[in-house]
Amino acid sequence: MLEIPITENRPTRIEGGDLQWTAHRNRSDGILTAGISEDFARVWRSGHLGIYGDVAGIMQRDPPFRYYGGGLVYRQSFGARGQAIRPYAGLGVGFYHLAIHDWTDQSVDRVGEKLFVGLDTPSGIFVEVAASTFGKTDQRQLNTLGVSLGFRF
């Protein structure tokens, strides 16, 4: 069952966080991230379908890896509404532009996927852990793992 428009009062989510990409010169560098999403439909009882945009490394000077992109996202909440802390999980699929600056400089455009889990609070604050993959280039897997803190409004 798909309900449009969304009836919850906080469909917009913004977040900032830290991304770990371990393919850079055999060390792990933190890369700053930011994102925004907007729910446009409720699916079943506590699922949400929306659009999202993500950036990583854009706000930093000379990061080894940066990207921007966006696409469709599905998020499923678990637990009862009004619960103090409500877990959720989701999947996003979108189109990204990636710039890699480590052993060689290269840019690629491709489809990327992200899986995420998080905790929502009634105040609108949430914390999320996400794993993303953008495929393989130059014998490297372009996988990331990050943690974000955000706010729903």
Image (tube, rainbow, N blue to C red):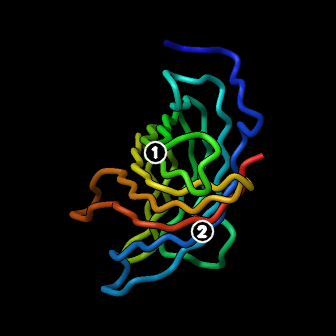
Q: Position of residue 115 (x, y in %)?
A: 39, 49
Quick check: 13 left or right of 127?
Answer: right
The residue that label 2 is drawn on is 17
**Picture residue at 50% right of the left edge, 41% below the top:** 77
Secondary structure category for the residue under label 2: strand
Task: Name the residue nearer the viewer: 50 or 71.
Answer: 50
Three-letter amino acid code at the position of disc 1: Asp
Res 56 → quadrant: bottom right
Task: Name the residue nearer the viewer: 84 or 44.
Answer: 84
Circle 1 packing at 10 Å, graded few (<14), some (14-19), many (20+), is some
Q: Where is residue 64 in the image (x, y as percent from the top left)?
A: 48, 75
Q: Position of residue 82 (x, y in %)?
A: 64, 45
Three-letter amino acid code at the position of disc 2: Gly
49 over 129 or under it: above or below: above
**Picture residue at 54% right of the left edge, 51% below the top:** 86
Tally the marks: 2
Q: Distance between the residues labelled 1 and 2?
A: 23 Å
Task: Name the residue nearer the viewer: 91 or 153.
Answer: 153
Q: Are marks 1 and 2 in contact (CB under 8 Å)?
A: no
Question: From the viewer's perspective, is the residue at label 1 or at label 2 nearer?
Answer: 2
Secondary structure category for the residue under label 1: strand
The residue that label 1 is drawn on is 109
Q: Which residue lies furthest to the left in this view?
A: 139
